[in-house]
Amino acid sequence: MPLLPYFASSGTGALPAAIGITAIALFGVGATLSLFTGRNAIFSGVRMLALGAVAGGMTFAIGRLLGVALA
């Protein structure tokens, strides 16, 4: 899902769209998991979104530390 914007367009518009789609997907997965855990759907969705944001931030930081660039 996160790569769909890159198939439709390129450049600076694809990254924010990919971030948005990823955020919606992460929240949706977390909210769906609440059906199995019995927790609040909003809590589970926000928790999954936060974990995904931390993972993405760490990946960005490690890439930055190693000098990896996308351009």
Image: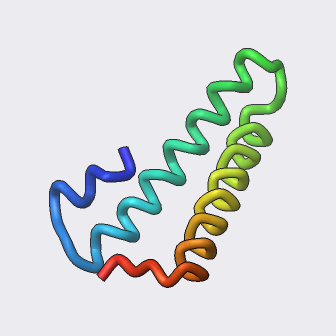
In the rendered view, would you say 25 is above or below 41? Answer: below
Residue plotted at (23% across, 60% down): 6
Q: Which quarter of the figure is the C terminus placed in?
A: bottom left
Q: Nearer the viewer, residue 64 or 14?
A: 64
Question: In the image, 34: left or right of 62?
Answer: right
Residue plotted at (16% across, 65% down): 9
Q: Residue furthest front?
A: 66
Question: In the image, 48: left or right of 5?
Answer: right
Q: Residue furthest top?
A: 36
Q: Nearer the viewer, residue 59 or 36?
A: 59
Image mark count: 0
> Where on the picture, by quarter, is residue 5?
bottom left
Q: Position of residue 68 (x, y in %)?
A: 45, 78
Residue plotted at (61% across, 72% down): 62
Q: Residue furthest right?
A: 39
Q: Position of residue 34 (x, y in %)?
A: 73, 25
Question: In the image, 42: left or right of 56?
Answer: right
> Where on the picture, by quarter, is residue 12?
bottom left
Question: In the image, 8: left or right of 31?
Answer: left
Q: Which quarter of the figure is the N terminus placed in?
A: top left
Q: Nearer the viewer, residue 41 or 55?
A: 55
In the rendered view, would you say 65 is above or below 54? Answer: below
User: How is the model colour-coded?
Assistant: rainbow
